Image (spheres, rainbow, N blue to C red):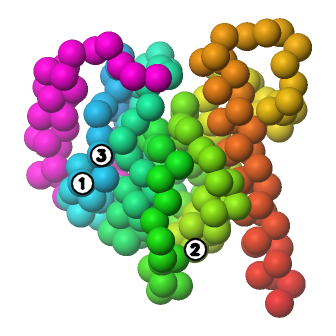
Amino acid sequence: MESDIPNYYYETMNGVLEYLFVFHSLEELSLEVGEGWDLDDTIVLTMARAWPNITKLHMRPDPPTHVIRRVTLAGLRAFALHCHKLSDLSINVDARVLFEELPASEDAQPALTALHVGYSPISNTPAVATLLFAMYPHLSLIVAEENATPDWQSASIDDDTDGGTDVYKLSRMFCYGWGRVQDMLEQKRRNVTEL
């Protein structure tokens, strides 16, 4: 879903964000803005390099919106490479965009255990799980759009009992996809410990 918010809104918000890049010792940051941020992988890389000591980073729209963001899984890789203490991340991503090669095992970031993705599209769940496991082998909690389906584990792509709107159906489908990724990550961790 495209945003009808003018570009200058996002440009202003991203400009405000740039002022925070000088705080290299920053450990926790939670920014919740009406329509959110228009982040992309380049801005996320700048954030990751600027805040190497960050442990909790929450960048969410409040209230949650159904605007698809431009950060991809490559943007999440920037946090794995530069933010080794990051344990709790909230950021909307477009997980339909995959990158070709798996990150090297020495690039794995062991601290991240919680990822809040909000309203984030996802398509190839096995590929997303493989990439996330390579980047964040201890990731154990993924939270998708809470307002659409409070319990994604009970959601199903085929469950259409209420005839909801397209946005609602997409949100449920994304929640279901992220739930599958979390289940796959758990299985991958079990497989590693059994070796």
Residue 96 vertical position relative to residue 113 in the rendered view, above or below: above
Q: Position of residue 59 (x, y in %)?
A: 38, 37
Q: Rounded to the nearest whole Å, what is the CA distance between mark 2 and mark 3?
A: 21 Å
How many numbered badges does the structure rendering display?
3
Question: Is residue 181 located in the magenta-colored stretch of the structure?
Answer: no
Tell me which segment is drawn in magenta: 1-29
Residue 167 visible: yes
Residue at numbered disc 3: 40
Q: Position of residue 24 (x, y in %)?
A: 19, 58
- Residue 123 is left or right of residue 37, and the answer is right
Question: Is residue 25 located in the magenta-colored stretch of the structure?
Answer: yes
Q: Quadrant of the C terminus?
A: bottom right
Circles 1 and 3 in contact, beta carbons < 8 Å: yes
Residue at numbered disc 1: 42
**Residue 74 occupies quadrant:** bottom left
- Residue 184 is left or right of residue 28, and the answer is right
Q: Secondary structure at mark 3?
A: loop
Q: Which amino acid, mark 2?
A: Ala
Q: Position of residue 48 (x, y in %)?
A: 29, 59
- Residue 22 is left or right of residue 68, and the answer is left
Q: Which mark is residue 134?
A: 2
